[in-house]
Amino acid sequence: MLSWDETIFRNPEIFDPDYVPDELLFRDSQIRQLVSCIRPAMLNSSPINAFCLGPPSTGKTSTIKYVLREAESEAGILYSYIRIPRFREPYKVFSKIFQDVLGQQSPPSGISKTVLMDRVWSNLDEPLLIVLDDINFLSKAYANEILYEILKAPDEYGVKVGIVAAATDVKFPLLLDPFVGASFHYMEIHYPSYGYREMKEILRKRVEYGFYEGVFDSRAFRRVVELAYNASDVRYGIYLLKAAGVNAESRGSRKVEERDVEVAHAGESLSFVAKILTALNSEERAVLRIIYSNDTISTGDLYEQVSNEVKMSYRKYYNILEKLERLKLIEISFGEKRRGKTRYVHRKYDAEVVERAMELI
């Protein structure tokens, strides 16, 4: 039995959600592109705008933080990193920029956003990089307001400022107002989903650095990789590694076994799905609810059911299906029907888990 001063973890922080490793695997291309956008700021010029696009858990946040960490240690670059889910309103975003640039708390909310940002731009005497991570969590109106304020600053104040935005919705840039879009020139950096071998190697590295040697059973590790790959989320795999280790310790074992992984998986699936559902609006959730009330259904029959409950064009319906598939909540496959082939929609999770997750958000 383990005592208080014994642990199977060599370095627990390896499994923290915000941990950025010293080496990012399989993202060399994305790192190089980000560096090329930020490098001008290190030479006292304006950074190049960048838009990081890809499904959840593909390394967007990690590569941004990795490059910023390297740039800061090498040249002391000035940046403001904003995780949008925590700052969903323009005033909160502008207040964070104010704090990061001026090194002081922002004034009370009674001061207008215009006055707040005027103080920022008037006191900015070096290149500034503004990171808007998970920008797709902003409403269209808020996104346009924030981007317009930043994009107009070089012309109005003569400052050097650039934007790095990240979104899971690859079509998000198309939602911007034409006026903003005309000023927002950026390099697109794409993040494909990790393959099975890539995910396995990423998780293997976490085991190597996070646990003592020989602690994690090979069957248990294979199960973690399988569950993470099925969920298309390497972060989920990292969570399972840590939770399985905690389960092993709680039963006084110095070996993480497959049963520890299964216990961790059973306890996390609900909150994991709930986190994904926060990225959906009311119409998207309505379509998902209808999908999960069926076993397998053709896209045509599904649209008929959707039309009876929610009024929307087929194009909008198609876009919603595309997003649900991209978030790995459903799978779409081709199959035979009557005279030819048609597309079928399949559930990725247990219907009860999704229903309970809907109630949580």
Image (cartoon, rainbow, N blue to C red):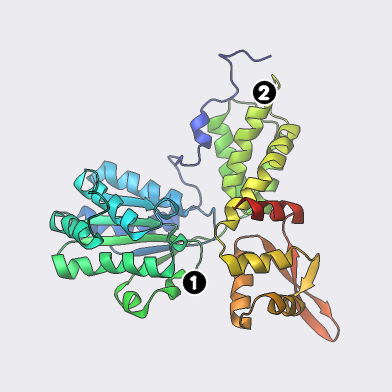
Residue type, label 1: Lys
How crowded pointer 1 is (Cα within 10 Å; few <14, some 14-19, many 20+) is rated as: few
Task: Please say if 346 is above or below 359.
Answer: below
Residue at mark 1 to residue at mark 2: CA–CA distance: 45 Å
**In terms of secondary structure, where does tag 1 sit?**
loop
Instruction: Check whether the beta carbons of the residues at disc 1 and disc 2 lie within 8 A of each other.
Output: no
At a point 32% along the width and 72% down the height, the residue shown is 185
Please tell me which residue lies in front, 323 or 284.
Answer: 284
User: Any mark on residue 12, and which?
Assistant: none
List x then y, in percent, for residue 201: 59, 44
For mark 2, give the secondary structure. helix
80 vs 62, nearest the viewer: 80
Name which residue lies at 60% across and 71% down: 320
Q: Residue 171, labelled with which disc?
A: 1
Number of dots carrying numbers:
2
Circle 2 is placed at which residue position? 250
The answer to whether 235 appears left or right of 1 in the picture is: left
Residue 281 position in % (x across, y down): 56, 65
Q: Is residue 156 positioned above or below 11 on the image?
A: below
- Residue at the image position 29 percent from the left and 64 percent from the top: 48
On the picture, is 334 further left or further right than 74? right
Q: Residue at x 75, y 53 (%)?
A: 352
For disc 2, the neighbor class at 10 Å (few under 14, some 14 to 19, many from 20) is few
Image-based side of 347 in relation to 6, left or right: right
- Most extreme residue toward the right is 338
Instruction: Name the quadrant containing residue 282.
Output: bottom right
Residue 136 shows in the view: yes
Circle nearer the N terminus (1, 2)? 1
Q: Specify the quadrant of the image occupied by residue 301.
A: bottom right
Which amino acid lies under the numbered mark 2 shown in the image of this protein?
Ser
Q: x, y (%) of residue 22?
A: 42, 40
Location of residue 107 in the rendering, given as x and y in whole percent from the top left corner: 22, 49
